[in-house]
Image (cartoon, rainbow, N blue to C red):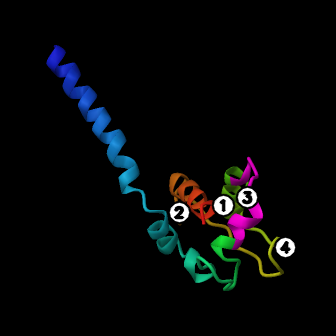
Amino acid sequence: MHKMISMLGLTVLGLGLSAPALADPEADMTKAGCNACHTKDKKLVGPSYKDIAAKNKGKADAVANLTAKARAGGKGVYGPIPMPPNPVAKIGDAELKAAVEWILKQ
């Protein structure tokens, strides 16, 4: 019984350690098509990731606000060109949150 519990604990620990290693926000953003309008450091159709990070620096609710904005789409924050919505079928909730967190570190 003790051996079984130890094995279960190691399995859970292993899963917990490997999940973040599998996350790749840049690949997820490329797959979702974000790079069609955004680049890391230059304005394209939309703002650069660095501009987004700078505009949201120090805001405690930045992750939640940007995640909601990316999911719903919007316009008027960085100019007249609207950002289309990004449904879950395009990028999952966890991937979108990780992408926003990555953007805010730029």
- Count neighbours of disc 1 (C-alpha within 10 A) and say few if under 14, some if 14 to 19, many if 20 or more: many
C-alpha gap between disc 4 and disc 3: 19 Å
Q: Residues within 10 Å of mark 4 (few under 14, many from 20)?
A: few
Nearer-the-camera pick, 1 or 62: 62
Type of amino acid under label 4: Gly
| Residue 78 horizontal side relative to residue 21, left or right | right
* Spatial CA span between label 1 and label 4: 16 Å
| Left or right side of 94 for 12 | left
Percent across and percent down for residue 8 are 24, 27
The tag on residue 57 is 3
Name the residue at 22% across, 20% down. Answer: 5
- In three-dimensional space, the C-alpha distance between marks 1 and 2, rounded to whole angstroms, equals 9 Å
The residue depicted at 34 percent of the width and 43 percent of the height is 17
Residue with the mark numbered 1: 71
Q: Residue at x 31, y 34 (%)?
A: 13
Magenta region: which residues? 51-62
Report the amino acid beneath label 3. Lys
The residue under label 2 is: 91
Whether residues under marks 4 and 3 lie with C-beta atoms below 8 angstroms apart, the answer is no
Marks 3 and 1 in Cβ contact (< 8 Å): no
Q: Position of residue 30 (x, y in %)?
A: 49, 74
- For the view shown, which residue lies furthest in the bottom direction? 44
Where on the picture, by quarter, is residue 34?
Answer: bottom right
For marks 2 and 4, the one nearer the N-term is: 4
What residue did someone put label 4 on?
76
